[in-house]
Amino acid sequence: MFEANTAVILVVSLVVLVAIGVHIAIALGMTSALGIWLTTGADSFAFGTVQSMLAATAYEAIRAYVFAVIPLFMLMGEFIGRSGTVTDVYRGINQLLKRIPGRLAIATVVGNALFSFVTGVSIASAAAFSRIAYPEMKRFGYHKGFALGAVAGSSCLGMLIPPSVLMIVWGILTEQSIGQIFAAGVLPGLLLMVLFVIYVFVRAVMNPELVGGGAARQAEAAAAEPDEVEEVSTGQFIISLCGILLVIVAVLGGIWFGVFTPTEGAGAGAFIGLMLAIIKGARLKDVIDGILQVGRTSAPILLLLVTAALYSRTLAMTGMANAIESLFLGSGMQPWMILTVMVVIWFLLGMIIDSISIMLLTAAIFAPIAVKIGIDPIAFAIIGIIAIEAGLYTPPFGLLVYTVKSAIQGFDPDMNVMTIFKSSTPYWIIMLIGMVLIINFPGIATWLPSLLFPS
C-alpha cells in the first residue's frame, strides 16, 4: 500500500509541477528525489541514497555511446541547413512543378520530406520552411492560412523520416534497434508525404483561390517585378540535390547495411554536412554558430534523458510501471481499445508539453504493454511517434504551430495563431488516417526493417 501511495504521489506531483510551468527536466528530477526519499525511509540517510542514485544514473546515461547520436545528427542537419542547400532544393522543385496546381505548397511538402532525411527535428523543418516557403507562397497570392498549414502540416515528416531525434529517443528508452526504427519510418513517412500532396492538389483544383489562381491574385502576381522572384540555376539545384542524396545514401545506407553503427553514421553525416557547408561558402563564424546552436538545443534533451532515466528507476522501485501494465491488461478491454487509450493520452499530453517529454514519460511503460497485446514493437514505435507528433498540432499549446507563428513574426506579425491551428487540422486528420493504416497493415512499417535486418 505504501509503494502504491508513493507512486500516486509521484505521478500527481509531476503533473502539478508541469502544469504550473516547471521545466520538465527539473520536475522529473524533483519528483524522482522525492520518490527515492520516500521509498528509502524518508529520513536523513535517504538523502545519501538520492545523491548516489542520481550520480549513478547520470554517469551511466552520459557515458553511453549511443547518446552521442543525438547531437551529431542535429549537427549534420544544422550544417546542411546553413549551407543553403535546402533553399536551393526547394526552389528547384518549385521550378520543376510549374504546371501543377498548388506547386509551391507541393514543393513545400516534398522539400520538407527531403529535408527530413538530413535533420532529426520537426521544429527545425517548421522554422526553416516558414522562412523559405511562406514568403514565396504569400508573394504568389496563396491564402495565408493554406500556405502556413502546408508548412506546419508537412514539418511533422521531420520526426518520422530518419534520422529522427524521436526515433533515437524511443530506441534508447525501449532498448530497440535504432537502425530498425529508422528503416521502419521510411515508408510511413513517404506515405504521409503522398497523402499530403494529394490533399494539396485536390484543394488547389477545387478552389484555385487558395493557391493564387483567382483573377485578382493572378493579376497581383503578374504585376510583381521579375527580380522579385528568386530562382536557382540548374547547376545549383543538381549540386544541392546530389549533396542531400549523398548524405542519405552514405549515412542511412551505411547504418542499414552494417557499415557502421548509428552513432558512427551520425558522425559521418556531421562531417559530410560540414564539407557541404564549406563547399557552399559557409564561413568559420557560421560553423561555430552552428555548433553552439546544436549545443544549446541538444543539452536540454540529454538532461531530459538523464532525469527521465532516474524517474523510470524511481517508478520501478514503487512498482508503478507494473501496476499500470496490470491495469491495462486486466481491464478486459480489446487490444484496439487499449491502443486507443494510449493514443488519446498522447494527444492530451501533446496539448501541454513537447514530444520528447511525452515520449520520456510514456514510451517505457506503453511499449511492453503493446507487445503483450500482440502489436509488433517496431510498428508500435512508428504508431507512437505519429500520435505524439500529431499532438503537437492540437490547441491550446501545439508546439509546431507556435514555432511557425514565431518564425513568421518578422514579416507577418498580424497572423492569428488560431488560423494556423485551423489550417493544420487537415494534416492532423491525414496523420490519423496514416496511423490507422499502420495499425491495420503493420507491414507498412515492418517490411523494410525485416528486409534490411533479417533475423
Image (cartoon, rainbow, N blue to C red):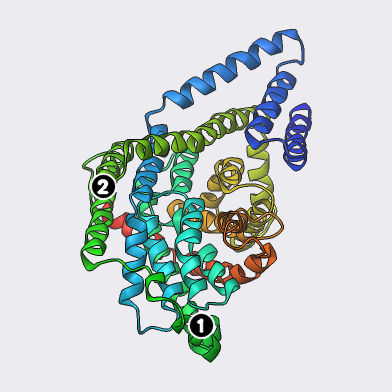
Q: Position of residue 156 (x, y in %)?
A: 50, 59
Closer-to-camera residue (324/74): 74
Question: What element does badge 1 sit on?
Answer: helix
Query: Quick check: can you spot residue 177?
Result: no
Q: Quadrant of residue 112?
A: bottom left
User: Which of 42 and 324 lies nearest the eye of the viewer?
Assistant: 42
Query: Which quarter of the picture shows residue 177?
Result: top left
Q: Residue at x 78, y 27 (%)?
A: 2
Q: Is residue 220 left or right of residue 34?
A: left
Q: Secondary structure at mark 2?
A: helix
Residue 301 x, y percent position in the rendering? 52, 36
Mark 2 = which residue? 276
Q: Amino acid at mark 1?
A: Glu
Please determine whether, in this image, residue 62 is positioned above or below residue 82.
above
Q: Nearer the viewer, residue 156 or 218?
A: 218
Q: Residue furthest top?
A: 45
